[in-house]
Image (cartoon, grey):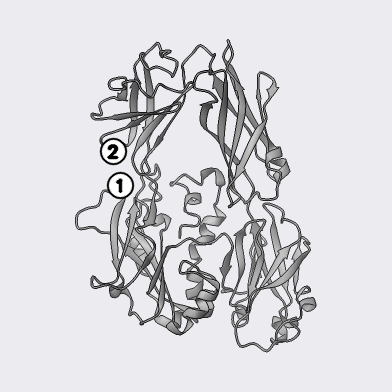
Amino acid sequence: MFRTALWRVPLLALCIALLSACSDRNGKIIPDSAFTPYIPAFTAGHISARSPILVRIADGQTWRDSSNAALQKLFKLDPAMEGTVTWYDHLTLAFTPKQRLKQDETYTIRFALTDLIEVPKELKEFVFQVTTYRQGIDARISDLQSLSNTDLTWQRALVAVHTSDDATGQDLEGCMTAEQNGRSLRLTWEHEPNGTVHRVVADSVQRGEQASSLIFRWNGERIDSEDKGELVFPIPSIGELQLVNTETNSEGEQYAALLFSDPLDAQQDVNGLAGITGVEETRVSIDGNKLLLYPGTRLTGDHQSFVAAGLMNVNGRKLGKDLTVDLTFEEVKPDVRLVGSGTILPSTDGLLFPFEAVNLNAVDVRIVRIYADNVTQFLQVNDLSGERELARVGRPILKKMVPLRGKDAPALGHWNRYYLDLAELIKTEPGAIYRVSIGFRRSYSTYPCPDQAAGGNTLQAAAAEEEGEDDVQWDSPNDYYYYYDDYYEYEEEYDHRRREDPCSPSYFRGKT
């Protein structure tokens, strides 16, 4: 049995203590590798301000006092923070702060190891650090909708809001206001479960005899953020049909979306009314206030679209003038995705693992075997797509950089399908579950960047990493650390404002 999943490093990372105990010139504490036989993993790097802090104890230790009262004294944080200590699993302790950690703050944690297990006297206290994310706010206009298709006086504006850290429990809603002509507008919020994606709607935007502006303002002080900003959105007068915003999308089927001030007449014949200059067979459709242009051939770079004066809104009012609109179609950002359900079974065709990739010339493949005898134990806390407590039930058996080559030269700006023949990579054990993870690094990107820093020219260096050897590599701290080696590189350079820029290291956080 095989369980497959795209590799994503979690925001709460566990890391192995590998290096000697010292502080660098910036005051960063590097844990002592002498603790590795007793503490094989712990929380490190950048974490969410809502995350617990974990310390895993190696199996086979001689325990001292592990009562609930004794556990509460194990963790000390600087700056000070009160919290509760519980068992995350049978070997991992979790310190959960009573209050949210401060954003963009480095905490030094002192763990009284000698109070929990028997260790040499020089290893009585384990010291390590974590740093919380800098909280930030990014807001973008996503849509403008009329409350009625006949009376266009009242509209609502939709704004997509992204926070760089989970804002659950924070007063994000108190950070933003909206006004039109000095009149404050009521805002309605929706929040995604991950706490970083939000949507806000201003539903009483008025179209009057004169044009006006809708202004969204935010101040992040209430969520421990220094971010401030505003969005100014033009609101045309009631008698005008105007283009108010333009965006392009290159993911999946490529298109340009032209957002107008009024809902458009979906019954009108759009043939010849709009298109992209120099592009034949451009398909045109209407979705509410949006005019959608789908080019017949895939485009990159700068282009121009045109809209004829005869375009009508739902009330038959015409645009009145021809428009020329500049468009920029970006390359598809580097990414990988699964094909199918994510679970495969051996078949007569072998163990083929299908996936798709775009703008990549290689991927990292990592496989963990959950032994047949441990499958029941694994399923006690997981379904087939789970990943909890893998160290208890499995071992990593392979890590490998795999170049992407098709039968023909792949079109790197398009999604291409590839197949891993797992039978060539691993020796399978009947009844075992295999967790196949696929990720990528910045060095594998073929996305065109101005400085060519992410041009994918370091495959030879990446390929020099040796493949793991079955059980041996799980017992080696270096191999377990491999799962998180690029995590720190991208975390140190992370800027949430460039999280969607594939020419920035921030884009690659969580993709290795």
Q: Residue at x 45, y 62 (%)?
A: 7
Q: Depth check: 109 or 430 in front? A: 430
Between the C-alphas of marks 2 and 1, the distance is: 9 Å
Q: Is residue 87 above or below residue 239?
A: below
Q: Is residue 20 visible?
A: yes
Q: Residue at x 65, y 31 (%)?
A: 217
Q: Which residue is mark 1?
A: 414
The picture places residue 401, in percent across and down from the top left corner, at 36, 66
Q: Is residue 476 visible?
A: no
Quadrant hosting residue 12: bottom right
Quadrant in which residue 223 is drawn: top right
Residue 241, how many percent across, how many down?
A: 46, 16
- Disc 2 and disc 1 in contact, CB within 8 angstroms: yes
| 281 is higher (above) or lower (below) than 482 | above
Q: Nearer the viewer, residue 94 or 454?
A: 94
Q: Residue at x 39, y 12 (%)?
A: 321
> Does residue 17 appear left or right of residue 101 in this picture?
left
What residue type is disc 1 on? His
* Quadrant placement of the C terminus: bottom left
Residue of label 2: 298
Badge 1: how crowded within 10 Å, few (<14), some, or many (20+)? some
